[in-house]
């Protein structure tokens, strides 16, 4: 191990272009073959049908650091990773790397379905650059980490896809690289294996491995990374501290989502349908629309629900609200009574004000149901709004300046979930 | 190509680094291939066996009149098709190896030489099976044992060298355009009839000149002469082809190496 803080990756004004059309791409490929053979410089201008997949990107990464690459699909993240891996060369600029590069990108590339897990470990580890002796030393460790048990001597085609991916991950992490490139593979396997994989990555970092992670999931990024690079259309939009970048990134995401506001709701199947939800507009301090960014959990979430009554309604109802994680776990719920009255064909508005509980950063959705006294569902929507809670969202509350939560008694017999405080207002029918 | 010194140093280093990986890949492919096959090693000499049978039938039924071959005709055809099969396998090997490993190439960084080397191992393995079969068979067909048979592996090596050289030069372009891969079997088929594989050299005329110009002719003739213990034709052509083959392999290797990153770019990831 060399000294701390040594620069392992230096990316210097790197650009890379790709071609939109396959046929043209192959023809340019043929020209480029000729150029390489003649030892000429790469052409750094765009030819017809070409575009910049990456444009003038620069950054450095030191030993033990972890860089997160974020950006929309097609922003150039994977292209960057492929260049760092030495698979393709930049069209302009330079990339300098020190030490052995390992990639958790194509887990189990080179696996053969007919061969046993044991044989595949040997082949895959060789492909990733482990010597015969090192493979022997590491073999038991790899098998243990992959948790494939007695499947090890069965052909790979009898493995579940999760098992094969676990085996691939275990081989890749056993290579002990100086630079580790990770492309959204931490989502492999069940929850327990994911945690184990994350731990293995953090251990590698503690031992001086530099990591570059590509992810759409800001959870991965905020948990492990020290720095973030936000790529947009091939260019660096922002480079800095993870919290700052991810918060900016999420705001931009929400603005994008708001501009293409979804009109379709996912209705609950057993609703009566006497009233129909036409539109909903949520508003929080972080923005408005059907996708909300929460950067302060002390502020209430305000939801305006615009209905049209198909048939005349005049009922005592219960508004029930569930807060569900992106994975589908119910974590908070609450309900409030109110009266719904509108003649047929009339539009009216219900306003709910919800005090969010102390949520962890991540994505959530809100369900909303209107129950009739007899137990029938008048109306129900399972994706009323989506919430993105920023890592910084609970700071205000921790400082003690916010209002205390759980102010009202829980009105629903939710098992294991947190009660939700709801305030209800209803406008008179709009005529 | 901008710094040849570094290029050749890199080639050497990667070749050394490739040896054990190439071995693994070859073992992987061979064992996977035979594990899913019932007839197994028979496939290594099935093609020559069938074409031998066809040509024996054609000549015996009088459909095709084959000139005097000097040795029993079945032995002549069998040795010819065996050696020709080794040549075509070596020729197609680099392209097959690269195309077969596309996903690996697009996603992983490993010494690219290992693919070619693994291909060579596979060709040599299947050639060895062929030789093990061909020698007893031709003995049975009336060929007497001869000291020259000890030289047969040399002939096989030279055939592999020449096939590999041409194959390496075709591989990069063949990776871009699938036309090359489709053309190879057609052209080798055509070339077989311009080579003394299933019938002897024509005595004279334009055909004889074509046969003589064909670089594979001396290879097949020498290989067969050593196999059957008949007098070999002049060895000058044979050895100069071996030399040319080695030089072409070096050229093809440089070509393969410098073009690889361009090719990977055009593969889907």
Image: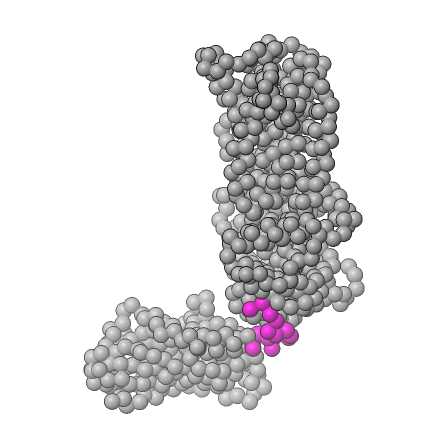
- The colour mode here is one colour
Closer-to-camera residue (A152/B203): B203
Residue A236 falls inside the magenta stretch: yes
Residue A110 on image: x %, y % = 58, 46
Q: Taking B78 as reference, is A418 left or right?
A: left
Q: Residue furthest front?
A: B205
Residue A140 falls inside the magenta stretch: no
Q: Taking A351 as reference, is A251 left or right?
A: right
Q: Is residue A179 visible?
A: yes
Residue B121 on image: x %, y % = 65, 34
How many marks can you see? 0
Quarter of the image that includes the C terminus of chain A: bottom left
Task: Identify whether A293 is placed above or below B264.
Answer: below
Closer-to-camera residue (A396/A231): A231
Q: Is residue B42 visible?
A: no
Going 72% across and 50% down the picture, which residue do you hit?
Answer: B1
Going 58% across and 86% down the picture, which residue do you hit?
Answer: A399
Task: Identify whether A428 is placed above or below A327.
Answer: below
Going 58% across and 35% down the picture, which residue do you hit?
Answer: B92
Residue B122 on image: x %, y % = 62, 33
Residue A383 on image: x %, y % = 38, 72
Q: Which residues are magenta?
A: A233-248
Going 68% across and 59% down the picture, which residue do you hit?
Answer: A179
Task: Identify whether A348 is placed above or below B144.
Answer: below
Quarter of the image that includes the N terminus of chain A: bottom right
Where residue B170 sits, quadrant-wise, is: top right
């Amino acid at each position: 191990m060399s000294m701390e803080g040594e620069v392992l990756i230096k990316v210097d004004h790197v650009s890379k272009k790709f071609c939109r059309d396959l046929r043209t791409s192959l023809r340019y490929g043929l020209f480029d073959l000729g150029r390489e053979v003649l030892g000429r410089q790469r052409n750094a201008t765009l030819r017809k049908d070409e575009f910049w997949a990456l444009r003038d990107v620069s950054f450095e990464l030191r030993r033990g650091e972890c860089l997160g690459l974020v950006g929309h699909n097609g922003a150039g993240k994977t292209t960057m990773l492929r260049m760092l891996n030495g698979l393709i060369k930049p069209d302009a600029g330079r990339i300098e790397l020190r030490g052995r590069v390992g990639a958790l990108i194509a887990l189990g590339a080179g696996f053969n379905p007919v061969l046993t897990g044991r044989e595949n470990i040997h082949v895959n580890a060789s492909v990733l650059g482990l010597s015969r002796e090192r493979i022997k030393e590491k073999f038991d460790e790899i098998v243990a980490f992959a948790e494939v048990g007695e499947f090890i001597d069965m052909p790979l085609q009898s493995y579940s896809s999760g098992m094969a991916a676990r085996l691939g991950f275990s081989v890749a992490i056993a290579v002990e690289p100086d630079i580790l490139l990770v492309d959204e593979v931490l989502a492999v396997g069940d929850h327990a294996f994911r945690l184990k994989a994350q731990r293995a990555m953090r251990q590698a970092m503690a031992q001086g491995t530099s990591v570059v992670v590509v992810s759409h999931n800001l959870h991965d990024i905020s948990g492990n990374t020290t720095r973030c690079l936000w790529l947009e259309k091939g260019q660096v939009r922002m480079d800095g501290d993870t919290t700052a970048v991810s918060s900016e990134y999420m705001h931009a995401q929400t603005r994008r989502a708001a501009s293409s506001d979804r009109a379709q709701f996912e209705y609950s199947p057993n609703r009566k349908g006497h009233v129909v939800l036409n539109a909903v507009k949520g508003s929080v301090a972080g923005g408005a629309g059907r996708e909300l960014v929460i950067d302060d959990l002390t502020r209430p979430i305000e939801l305006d629900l615009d209905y049209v009554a198909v048939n005349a309604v005049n009922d005592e109802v219960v508004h029930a609200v569930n807060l569900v994680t992106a994975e589908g776990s119910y974590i908070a719920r609450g309900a409030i009574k109110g009266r719904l009255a509108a003649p047929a064909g009339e539009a009216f508005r219900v306003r709910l004000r919800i005090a969010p509980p102390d949520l962890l950063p991540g994505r959530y959705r809100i369900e909303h149901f209107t129950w009739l006294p007899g137990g029938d569902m008048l109306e129900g929507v399972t994706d009323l709004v989506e919430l993105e809670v920023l890592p910084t969202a609970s700071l205000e509350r921790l400082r003690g300046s916010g209002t205390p939560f759980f102010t009202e008694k829980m009105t629903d017999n939710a098992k294991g979930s947190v009660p939700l405080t709801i305030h209800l207002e209803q406008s008179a029918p709009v005529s | 190509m901008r710094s040849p010194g570094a290029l050749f140093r890199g080639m050497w280093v990667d070749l050394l680094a490739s040896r054990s990986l190439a071995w693994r890949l070859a073992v992987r492919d061979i064992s996977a291939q035979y594990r899913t096959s019932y007839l197994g090693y028979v496939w290594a000499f099935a093609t020559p066996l069938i074409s031998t049978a066809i040509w024996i039938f054609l000549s015996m039924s009088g459909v095709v009149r084959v000139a005097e071959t000097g040795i029993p005709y079945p032995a002549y055809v069998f040795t010819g098709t065996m050696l020709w099969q080794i040549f075509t396998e070596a020729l197609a090997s680099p392209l097959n190896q690269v195309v077969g490993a596309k996903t690996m190439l697009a996603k992983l960084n490993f010494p690219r030489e290992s693919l070619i080397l693994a291909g060579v191992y596979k060709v040599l393995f299947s050639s060895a099976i062929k030789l093990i079969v061909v020698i007893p068979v031709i003995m049975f067909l009336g060929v007497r044992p001869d000291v020259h048979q000890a030289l047969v592996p040399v002939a096989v090596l030279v055939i592999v060298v020449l096939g590999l050289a041409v194959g390496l030069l075709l591989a990069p372009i063949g990776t871009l355009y699938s036309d090359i891969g489709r053309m190879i079997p057609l052209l080798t088929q055509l070339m077989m009839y311009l080579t003394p594989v299933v019938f002897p050299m024509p005595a004279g005329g334009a055909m004889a000149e074509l046969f003589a110009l064909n670089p594979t002719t001396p290879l097949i003739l020498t290989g067969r002469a050593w196999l059957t213990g008949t007098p070999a034709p002049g060895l000058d052509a044979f050895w100069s082809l071996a030399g040319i083959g080695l030089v072409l392999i070096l050229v093809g290797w440089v070509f393969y190496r410098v073009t690889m990153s361009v090719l990977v770019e055009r593969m889907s990831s």
